[in-house]
Image: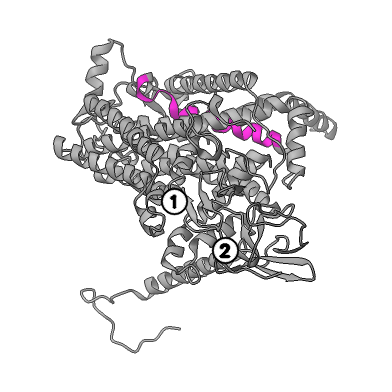
Amino acid sequence: MTPATDKRDALQQFAANLKSAPRRLRETAFRTGPPTTDRTRSLFVFGNVVLHLHSVRTHRWSLRWTTTLGLGIMSVSAFLITLVTGVMLMFYYKPYPDVAYESIKDIHFVVPTGRLIRNLHRWSANIMVVAVIVHMARAFYTAAYRHPREFNWLMGIGLLVVTLGLSFTGYLLPWDQLAYWAITIGANIAQSPREVTDALGVTEYFDPGGLLRLLLLGSDQVGAEALIRFYLLHVMLLPMALAALMAVHFWRIRKDGGLARPAGADEELARERREETFPVFTEAPAKTYHLAAVVRGRTANVGRGPENTVPSMPHLFYAELGVLMFTLLVCLALSLVSDAPLKELANPSVPENPAKAPWYFLGLQELVSFSAFMGGIGIPTIVLLGLGLIPYLDRETEGTGRWFGGPGGWPLARLSIVFGLCAPIVIETIAIRFGWLREWFPDIPQLIVTAVNPATILTTVYALYSLWCIRRHQSVRSGAVALFTCFLCGFVVLTVIGTYFRGPNWVFYWSPADWPRH
Amino acid sequence: MTTMGKTPRSRLDPEPVARRDWLGLSSLWAMASALLFGLVGMLKLPKAAVLASPSKGFRVPVPEKLSADEPFIPPGRSVAIFKDGDGVYAISTICTHLGCVVKANPDGFECPCHGSRFAANGEVRKGPAPRPLPWLKVTVNAGVITVDENATVPHGTKVAL
């Protein structure tokens, strides 16, 4: 060969390579090709770092919309919307007192699409809180927390706490009156263990409340230090914690053998519709997979074949995308209808009257209006511990994967709803109509008020009711259903009272129209 | 360095913990404790050593009208200053419940956040407040009242003008 032809060949090769570069780029990025066969659909899932959190095939029971109502994916979708809109807001937001308020005003009134992005952020955050709570209720009422999913239930509780933390920290950032006083109250709730240490007279030596407040605010009052800390928590620490917990949460769904389903799911599906199920691999597999060794579950899949499953791509993924689009649509609609509030600039010497926290904390605010420590720390801790213990106390198997499964069933849940709604209404009525211990005995020691107040009495009543249910149905699951239903009902009643029936000075009013004008 | 002092143990009488296991475990624990202590040390950072807050002491000239019924509240401060026959006294207007600023009314104080009520001397009358409103240290010098919001005094401490 002569050097000349060599050179020409190399150039031709170069041109050909250049021409094929886009195709090669696509082939190297998406190595498995289009998901047209069951095999490439499988490869599509486990060849992708995000998608392989899902299993390759999904049981048809999991895809029925009554199984999950799409609530988990709705929570994630709302989180993704807050993530994207939150990053957008960070372009203009400045975390410094007064300047922060101005920057939110700029975002709201000057920045192109700023108002829509801010509304979207606020509405998706609200929807995320609702979706997470309802998702927890779904997992509870279908008894999906049971073995082997106990740990994932704990991860879910962690996600609930972080979600509420994100909402709370985001509340301070606009630095308006609403924000300032909500955070003042929140920070003092963190300090409320002092209610006990003061009553015991040991605050001087042992002051966890003061330390907690100092760590939260970075100062002894809500100021620049507090704002930058809440900002750090809101945009960095809590989102990272949330992302980490979410990854574990999703991964465990797959590792725990998919969504919980009743023992007779397969027979039921077969009765429901006579649809052929396809073999997993329509062509000879290129590799073999030891699924039985990896997936934990009560029933070994060895030798049985994955009946009643369909490829996750497209069945599951399209359903998930549908939920994402639905969530986006709801957020968008709400954002167009209702603007995120912005009150006047924070004024440390004049509180809002009434000073109300975001709606999902108004139940707690109702409780702290009886005792700061019990309402703000004691009872929430008891509730979280109780929720976390549920899968370890309820080790029954009856009714797993069925709505209101287990002894008692729907009638028990119905009775619990009635009881759970009535108990707080009666207790609140007594407290609102007749006052409480402090008014009857002005010199009563604080420890007694801390221990005996409407909040602790409500908790005790709920606990006794659920013990009674355990005895009546001879089942721990029944007690759990009773307690969880009561917890949800109590949350609703207290939130409604806090939102609609509390006016200036936290006095009970039937309607905001009756509030005194001044 | 290896030592060959002892008689080698038999397969049926193994060492309680193999030497390599022990070395491995101890290095693991050393690493874990080093990381743990490092983390604990880092936790000191968020706890501020110096608090970035404005001075808690302030001075105001003795106002013309100072009575036991209607408090004088210096602008921008959460302190109510009174005067009666015995002298001048100052009561903090920060609610002992959750830190809202209480408002003076004819009977005493009321908190807008959770409905605590206090008597005119700061005692709790109603609501969730766990402690009475604290009385603050007051000094009067040449027509100027100095209040130290950090220093509390027993209830009923009054300073003659």
The residue tagged 1 is: A377
User: Which residue shows up at 68% across the image and 28% down it?
Assistant: A117
Q: Which of the 4 image quarters holds residue A107?
A: top right
What amino acid does circle 2 point to? Leu
CA–CA distance between discs 1 and 2?
22 Å
Around disc 1, counting alpha carbons within 10 Å, would you say few (fewer than 14), some (14 to 19), or many (20 or more)? some
Q: Nearer the viewer, residue A359 or A244?
A: A359
**Quarter holding the N terminus of chain A?**
top right
| Relative to A138, A95 lies left or right | right
Q: Nearer the viewer, residue A259 or A233?
A: A233
Residue A83 falls within the magenta-colored stretch: yes
Around disc 2, counting alpha carbons within 10 Å, would you say few (fewer than 14), some (14 to 19), or many (20 or more)? few
Residue A191 at x, y percent in the picture: 52, 56
**Visible residue check, residue B41:** yes
Range covered by the magenta-colored residues: A66-89
| Relative to B88, A488 lies left or right | left
Label 2 lies in what chain? Answer: B
Q: Nearer the viewer, residue A371 or A322?
A: A371
> What secondary structure is the stretch in magenta mostly built from?
helix
The residue tagged 2 is: B43
Q: Which of the 4 image quarters holds residue A517?
A: top right
| Relative to A382, A128 lies left or right | right
| Relative to A89, B111 lies left or right | left
Residue A320 at x, y percent in the picture: 48, 23
**Quarter holding the C terminus of chain A?**
top right
